[in-house]
Image (spheres, grey):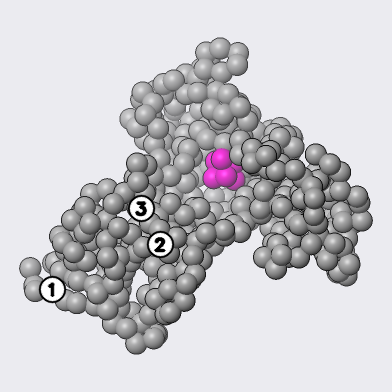
Amino acid sequence: MPSGETYDILVIGSGESGKYLAWTMASEGHRTAVVERRLIGGSCPNIACLPSKNIIQSAKVRAYTRRAAEFGVDLESAATNMKGVQARKRAMVESLIEVHLGRYAASGAELIMGGARFSGDRTVDVELNDGGRRQLRGERVFLNLGTRAAMPDVPGLAAARPMTHIELLDLDRLPEHLIVIGGGYIGLELAQAMRRFGAQVTVIESGSRPLGQEDADVTAGIVDLFGAEGIALHSQTRVRSVDGESGRAVRLVVDGPDGERTIEATDLLVAVGRTPNTGGIGLEQAGVRLTETGYIAVDEHLATTAANVWAMGDCAGSPQFTHVAFDDFRVVHDNLTGGSRTTSGRLVPFCMFTDPELARVGLNETEARRLGLGYRVLSMPTRTISEPRGFMKMLIAADSDEILGFTAFGAEATELLAAVQTAMVGRLPYTALESAIYTHPAMAEGLTFLLRNTPVPA
């Protein structure tokens, strides 16, 4: 192996945190290298956030075609063409990769494609994808390792070769009947999309209801939505065994409120959470300690247990959103350049891109009750563009006008959320929003009427 090369900044993983740190530090004059196994730019532009939203948008257009007459449009044929759906998504991914490569070239950061393994303090051996090896050492090292889809230990499940979101988002055909194991954000988003393309869809959730961390009125809205769209949703149901092969025929034995039963389908998607990519890369050689759940142990500045080594994004146990990973970059960069930014007390928005969307920031009622906080509630339905379902609600402190949290389930909810989140960041009382003039007939105008009400004690 060639003798080691030393960089000022060495980043392992080119996801959201890693790439922005690399581009920024290189632009500021630091000799910078990024080691990436496969996905230039990480999962978001390749196999996760942006591809999924691309597919979901296509499914939304497909859903509109079924409702064409409602909008005064006559259509002779609107059949789903999955090859066309995928062509649109792949064109987007290819263009995003070109943008990333351009950012590397412009910043001067070196992108090294290969697998890295630590061999010592801030030193990695890299097996290059195109052959050969390099040894790299960083004066400062940043871990941006990401996560992967978890696979539960169910008899026969692994042998059935189920899809994760990666395979489903690259499927050139439409499943005849798709079973989704998991009623979280990913499972619900993709379940609705596949149903709108024309697949029969069944969702199996082991908890008492989908999105168990959300309030009961939110999950009731999701259950009603999925029922209206013809998606079978089984809560309090556990998969006991799986037979067959996804893509051909699968047979699941499940145990639910009505006892044991069998569900048969053609395809199987597993969406039950994430596992950190922290194993098998020699972190122990670098003095980096892991938590009991396999994430990298970090402090509020995202520093690890090893000197001059930081971790960012999913692998550091941060909330698993790209917008949080970007903020992790800001935390680290600010501290590298003389600041004192931390991850403590971050106001993180949670958004699910079903149609309608679900968006929440701050506390919901479930969390407020668990914390023993008194609160008042403002709520109202949303009907701006004549969609049949949706509501918004705001939690106000019991003894002040502080906004504790906001939830919106409806069209463009994620955009509506931003106005309230901005007020919360600025610590404005809810009465400050009440006096604002919002554009008519934009979704945000709903805040005008929501805030005209008197908060109701919980």
Residue at 36% from the left image edge and 52% from the top image edge: 297
Q: Disc 3 and disc 2: Cα gap in Å? A: 8 Å
Q: Which residue is mark 2?
A: 302
Given this view, does label 2 or label 1 mark the residue nearer the observer? 2
- Quadrant in the rendering for residue 364: top right
Q: Please indicate, yes or no, whether residue 392 appears anywhere in the rendered image.
A: no
Locate the C terminus and report the quarter of the image it occupies.
Answer: top right
Residue 186 in the image, given as x and y percentages of width and height: 54, 45
- Quadrant in the rendering for residue 132: bottom left
Q: Which residue is mark 1?
A: 4
> Badges 2 and 1: C-beta atoms under 8 Å apart?
no
Q: What is the secondary structure assignment of the residue under circle 1?
A: loop
Q: Amino acid at mark 2?
A: Leu
Residue at 15% from the left image edge and 69% from the top image edge: 135
Residue 168 in the image, given as x and y percentages of width and height: 47, 45
Q: Which residue is mark 3?
A: 297
The magenta stretch is 184-190
Q: Main secondary structure of the magenta part?
A: helix
